[in-house]
Image (cartoon, grey):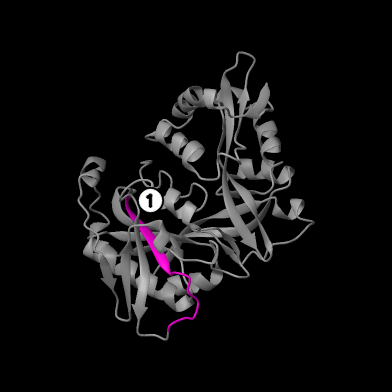
């Protein structure tokens, strides 16, 4: 058994391996191409690994997708772990344990939503639970929840998202270029652990596929303007989840909590005009969870956030209540819904 980094020549075999491991997912070849070759950080920070048997066949993998993060004064490249899997006949071997051990040598590793078996292995090699990512739902049309849609019908639905969304107190305009999102070098929070939303990231993550993600920015409101020039924005996409047509609030950043409240109202209005049955989103910060609750979003499940940050940063702890994670991080929204890329 050999553990090594993924090379370009491995891609055809890697695609075939993923098709066998994840038969329910569509466009696996496209997803691998997107993560390995289009991520602006992948070229210089490729750390994904595979387990290969004596015949040269791939029997396991651990994908590591690079991102930037900042926590207090520490800014660095991190790697989100994803699609950590070993084929069934090798699960009694040490392949899975060795894959995890080698993956967690990277500085810094983060993970989202690992199962209990994987969590115990991760803890063995230095990961710990640093927070929780809670999943929320807001029912828009309770009478349509039981009227589930077929997958083929969902894909034929035509959505026409408006250029402007007005709430009672605010206006949001649709964004068609990543350069319209202004930030402080990719960050909004000064004390939270935050993953970068610089122009390169936004262009890759949310604009690579035309009209897959719908982006809006805050442009005006009746409340007193915040002096921070960073753009408050939100990103959504329609999905079929449990055969219900939903609007997924994928990502958000804002200059004030008041703007987050207005974002939720704008998303609600969008969902109603597009005749969605529900809105789904995720949240990792307790202060924002209170605003979600006040806007009738209800928590229905949650997953842990793990990292080896403490081990590899002089035992520096993380404030578990001060981590900003959305569906736009890791692979949380990849295949969200009925396994559709």
State the image coordinates of residue 207 (x, y, percent, origin top left). Answer: 38, 51
* Image quarter (top left, top right, bottom left or bottom right) of the C terminus: top left
Q: Is residue 229 left or right of residue 240?
A: right
Q: Which of 25/216 is in front?
A: 216
- Looking at the image, the residue that sits furthest to the front is 179
* Image quarter (top left, top right, bottom left or bottom right) of the N terminus: top right
Is 29 within the magenta? no
Instruction: Report which residue position mark 1 lands on.
Output: 207
Q: Which residues are magenta?
A: 225-239
Q: In the image, what residue occupies the spot 68% across and 43% down? A: 106
State the image coordinates of residue 340 (x, y, percent, origin top left). Answer: 36, 41
State the image coordinates of residue 182 (x, y, percent, origin top left). Answer: 46, 66
Q: Is residue 177 above or below residue 258?
A: above
Q: In the image, what residue occupies the spot 43% across and 83% down? A: 225
Q: In the image, what residue occupies the spot 73% across and 61% down? A: 317
Residue 281 visible to an observer of this rendering: yes
Is 230 within the magenta? yes
Q: In the image, what residue occupies the spot 66% across and 33% down? A: 99
Q: Is residue 330 above or below residue 296?
A: above
Q: Is residue 92 left or right of residue 187?
A: right
Q: Secondary structure at mark 1?
A: helix
Q: Which of 179/328 is in front?
A: 179
Residue 141 visible to an observer of this rendering: no
Q: Which of 214/1 is in front?
A: 214
Q: Which of 78/159 is in front?
A: 78
State the image coordinates of residue 89 (x, y, percent, origin top left). Answer: 58, 22
- Give the class, few, some or many, for how many residues have Cα within 10 Å of label 1's Cα (few <14, many ≥20): some
- Looking at the image, the residue that sits furthest to the top is 55
Q: Is residue 196 above or below residue 102?
A: below
């Amino acid at each position: 058994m050999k553990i090594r980094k993924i090379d370009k020549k491995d891609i055809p075999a890697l695609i075939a391996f993923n098709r066998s491991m994840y038969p329910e997912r569509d466009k696996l070849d496209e997803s691998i191409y997107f993560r390995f070759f289009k991520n602006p950080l992948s070229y210089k920070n490729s750390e994904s690994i595979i387990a290969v048997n004596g015949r040269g066949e791939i029997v396991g993998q651990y994908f590591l997708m690079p991102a930037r993060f900042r926590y207090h004064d520490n800014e660095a490249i991190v790697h989100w772990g994803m699609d950590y899997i070993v084929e069934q006949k090798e699960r009694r071997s040490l392949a899975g344990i060795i894959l995890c051990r080698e993956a967690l040598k990277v500085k810094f590793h983060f993970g989202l939503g690992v199962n209990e078996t994987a969590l115990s292995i991760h803890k063995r090699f230095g990961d710990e639970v640093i927070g929780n990512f809670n999943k929320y739902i807001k029912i828009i049309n309770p009478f349509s929840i039981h009227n589930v849609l077929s997958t083929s019908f969902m894909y034929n639905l035509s959505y026409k998202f408006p250029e402007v969304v007005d709430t009672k107190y605010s206006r949001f305009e649709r964004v068609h270029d990543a350069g319209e999102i202004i930030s402080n070098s990719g960050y909004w929070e000064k004390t939270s652990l935050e993953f970068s939303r610089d122009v390169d990231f936004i262009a890759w993550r949310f604009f690579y596929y035309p009209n897959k993600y719908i982006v809006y920015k805050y442009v005006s409101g009746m409340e007193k303007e915040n002096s921070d020039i960073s753009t408050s924005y939100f990103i959504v996409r329609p999905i079929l989840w449990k055969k219900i047509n939903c609007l997924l609030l994928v990502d958000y950043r804002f200059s004030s909590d008041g703007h987050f409240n207005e974002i939720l109202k704008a998303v609600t209005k969008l969902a109603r005009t597009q005749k969605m049955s529900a809105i789904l989103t995720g949240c990792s910060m307790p202060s924002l969870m209170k605003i979600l609750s006040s806007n009738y979003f209800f928590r229905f499940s949650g997953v842990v956030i793990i990292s080896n940050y403490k081990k590899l940063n002089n035992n520096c702890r993380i404030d578990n209540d001060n981590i900003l994670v959305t569906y736009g991080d890791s692979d949380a929204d990849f295949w969200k819904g009925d396994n559709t890329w």
